[in-house]
Image: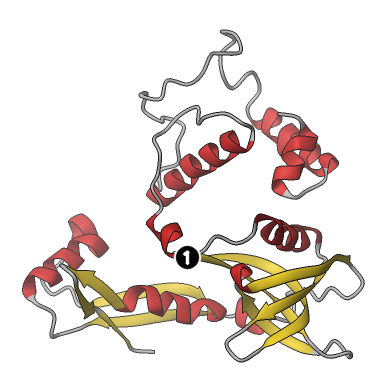
Amino acid sequence: MSASRLGRILGQSREHVQRHVISAYRHEFPGVLVGGAGRNHSIDKHEDLHFAPASAHMLLDLLRGEASLSSALGGSARFGIPVEDVGAVSFRETEPEILRSLYRSCVQRRCVLIEYVSKRQTSVMRFSPHALVRDVARLHFRGYAATGQDLKGYYIDLVPSRVRRIFDDVDKWNYVSGDEDKDWHERINLKFRLNPDLPNNIRQILSLEYEGENSRQNFDRLDIPAVRLAMRLYVERVVKFRFFNKKVYQVWIPEN
């Protein structure tokens, strides 16, 4: 893969990719990644992924990333198995050009002029993204939004699928960084207690899911350290409720 082609996929310049991705990789891992058995040589899909990260979530990201890059290049994944993403089924996919524009703006620190549909209204705003967040089934960009002529605004979480159109994405002069985003930089420790009304079989399941081999008989607390304040509501929303056998339970009760 050429540096220019990889740059288009990642939303970065060819020079940046060559210097910080390709050259850095070759320095860290000298030699050829796949043996020289010809162009059709590929990694055995049935081999164990010895080079894979230990974290289960990182492994899934690796498999999905490999499949996506291979698909973008017109081929099939060289290793791994297909990963069915249930979360992606329930939400409409963001228009590719809109996501690319927002991503490029975040990487290159540029302001985008967009038409956005929020819970309150539809408005035209200047948005300066500084971070990308994956919240289970959807993505959102964290950044500074301004709707007035004086460009005064506030930091918001912008969902790409709610962007109707992008009018301009080359504005570097009006970009507002995330340096003053206090809710993004402040971190808090979230504390939860297990719902005492849960059936015993559900409590046993949860003790294994959260503590594994270290599960305790009096398992009743969950502490999540160093959560960004801007992500608190998303974390609470993920852990509070669960479905078991088509019935929803409130599993964790926030104590903060």
At x 70%, y 47%, the residue is 10
Specify whether 73 is left or right of 47: right
Compared to 109, does 79 lie above or below? Answer: above
Coordinates of residue 104 in the picture (x, y in percent)? 76, 57
Q: Which residue is mark 1?
A: 91
- State which quarter of the image contains the N terminus: top right
Residue 185 appears in view: no
Coordinates of residue 210 in the picture (x, y in percent)? 26, 64
- State which quarter of the image contains the C terminus: bottom left
At x 63%, y 27%, the residue is 29
Q: In which image quadrant can residue 99 be found?
A: bottom right
- Report the amino acid beneath label 1: Phe
At x 39%, y 35%, the residue is 81
Number of numbered callouts drawn: 1
Q: In which image quadrant can residue 184 be found?
A: bottom right
Coordinates of residue 195 in the picture (x, y in percent)? 20, 83
Q: In which image quadrant can residue 83 be found?
A: top left
